[in-house]
Image (cartoon, grey):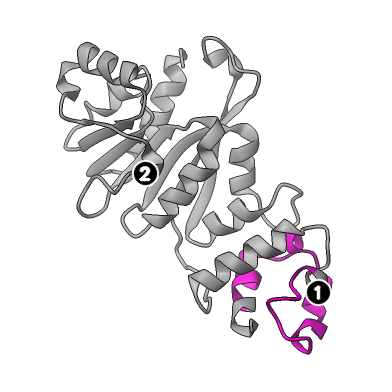
Amino acid sequence: MKDENICKKIVKAVEDQHPKQLLEIGPGAGAITKYLYRLNDVNFKAIELDEEKVRYLQHTYPLLNGKIIHQNFLEAAPPFEGRFHIVGNFPYNISSQILFHILEWREQVPVVTGMFQKEVAQRVAAKEGNKVYGIISVLVQAFYDVEYLFDVHENSFNPPPKVKSGVIQLTTARKTPAMRSEKDFFNLVKTAFNQRRKMLRNGLKGLFHEDILKQDIFTKRAEQLSVEQLAALTFQMR
């Protein structure tokens, strides 16, 4: 990331949420880290897997010593007691896995500000009826309100990637939809969208009794149902 204006916009989006504790995922060469660790009254940590990047950051920004966790985020435990915010220019190849891991921490994480490949950012923010609405859209939006903040042009990077990027912000949902259990909800959503071209009646045969599957809602496809409708269906599962 070479565009300082974009770096500052991301930092401003974080700062506006008034974090007390802040974790950056994948600081890399420190494009936004150099601003984040200086934020007033913020307990800052970063998690980075690449040993060379860790050494670079510790050498370039000595005040980061003791604040960098050298670990794979996907295998990490929460680095703070209590609530903390997350920020990152997330590695595009594992960005969905990062979001699923953050969902496991959601009781502690009220705000996530992240840069993703644009298609992934759009998918996370998509509503029902949109062709990119899918598993990640539903599972994130069940627990977070999603705001698409801005696009990031490929020329903001050196070297420029072959894809555009987008920055989104997640904040704890004002209202989580009622569901029988999170396990049922995750199972229903994954099963429904794994056969997204089928009517729900055909794709969900194993999860509901035949008489339930006769309801009109089961003539729809998964992408036509809102997060709330999918959550409500869990109460009728076997």
Point 46% across, 43% down: residue: 98
Q: Relative to 10, is 170 above or below?
A: below
Residue 207 x, y percent position in the rendering: 68, 77
Q: Is residue 188 left or right of residue 194?
A: left
The residue labelled by disc 2 is 75
Bin the neighbour count of mark 1 within 10 Å (Cα to Cα): few under 14, some 14-19, many 20 and up. Answer: many
Rendered location of residue 32, percent (x, y): 36, 23
Q: Which three-letter amino acid code belongs to the residue tagged 2?
A: Glu
Does residue 226 show up magenta in the picture? Answer: yes
Q: Which residue is depicted at the point 37% across and 39% down?
A: 73
> Is 104 on the left or on the right of 150, as rendered?
left
Which residue is at the front of the view, 11 or 22? 22
Please provide percent x and percent y for residue 182.
49, 70
Q: Amino acid at mark 1?
A: Arg
Q: Quadrant of the C terminus?
A: bottom right
- Mark 2 surroundings: few (<14), some (14-19) or many (≥20) residues within 10 A: few
Q: Relative to residue 204, is residue 46 drawn left or right? A: left
Measure the alpha-carbon separation of dots 1 and 2: 37 Å
Task: Give the labeled residue for mark 1.
Answer: 201
Indicate which disc residue 129 carries. none
Magenta segment boundaries in residue numbering: 203-232
Q: Residue furthest bottom?
A: 211
Q: Regarding mark 2 in the picture, which secondary structure is present there?
A: helix
**Residue drawn at 47 percent across, 32 percent down:** 90
Q: Image quadrant of residue 194?
A: bottom right
Q: Is residue 167 visible?
A: no
